[in-house]
């Protein structure tokens, strides 16, 4: 199921961060306590759903955070519709909740972290997406 807010999203357990692209999909997995986020190997777009399903099973994933590419004013970008379709299709095949989080500037931050090593950019971007979502959830828990 695709959630609209973090209210019903898991508060513990391994999470999967996804930076979707039509050619490459970056992935990152959190530790169960959300203390650490680990980039994983990128997967190819045409086989990404199967590989994500396998990762959910092998890593005991309890929720998916999917980066949503929006323009800086918050409106949908050209890729936004494709990401939403990907999430809807994935939700039909997995039993864990999926939630979107804005991914603005995650590639910039990821690029700075890895010193422009382009081959790791997508998974490092997924790590940034996941770290940002975890920070947001933790802030809301402390309110």
Image: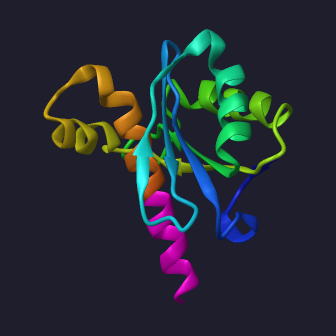
Magenta stretch: helix, strand or loop mostly: helix
The reply to whether the magenta stretch includes residue 141 is yes
Q: Is residue 46 left or right of residue 37?
A: right
In the image, 103 versus 53, the foreground residue is 53
The reply to whether the magenta stretch includes residue 4 is no
Residue 127 locus on image (x, y percent):
41, 45
Image point (37%, 48%), residue name: 128
Q: Is residue 57 visible?
A: yes
**Which range of residues does the magenta coloring cover?**
132-143
In the image, 59 versus 128, the foreground residue is 59
Q: Is residue 86 above or below residue 70?
A: above
Q: Is residue 70 above or below residue 53?
A: below
> Residue lying farthest left?
115
Q: Is residue 73 visible?
A: no
Residue 21 locus on image (x, y percent):
49, 22
Image point (69%, 23%), residue name: 49
> Residue lying farthest bottom?
143
Image point (44%, 68%), residue name: 135
Q: Is residue 38 left or right of residue 78?
A: left
Label tally: 0
Residue 84 locus on image (x, y percent):
66, 33
> Residue lying farthest front?
58
Residue 85 locus on image (x, y percent):
71, 27
Image point (76%, 67%), residue name: 8
On-image quarter of the C terminus: bottom right
Q: Is residue 59 left or right of residue 91?
A: left
């Amino acid at each position: 199921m695709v959630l609209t807010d973090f209210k019903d999203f898991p508060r513990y357990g391994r999470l999967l961060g996804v930076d979707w692209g039509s050619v490459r999909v970056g992935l990152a997995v959190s530790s169960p306590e959300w203390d650490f986020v680990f980039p994983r190997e990128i997967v190819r777009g045409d086989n990404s759903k199967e590989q994500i399903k396998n990762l959910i099973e092998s890593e005991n994933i309890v929720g998916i955070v999917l980066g949503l590419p929006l323009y800086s004013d918050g409106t949908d970008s050209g890729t936004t519709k494709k990401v939403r379709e990907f999430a809807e299709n994935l939700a039909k095949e997995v039993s864990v909740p999926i939630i979107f989080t804005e991914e603005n500037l995650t590639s910039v931050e990821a690029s700075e972290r890895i010193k422009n090593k382009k081959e790791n950019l997508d998974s490092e971007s997924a790590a940034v997406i996941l770290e940002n979502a975890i920070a947001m959830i933790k802030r809301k828990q402390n309110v």
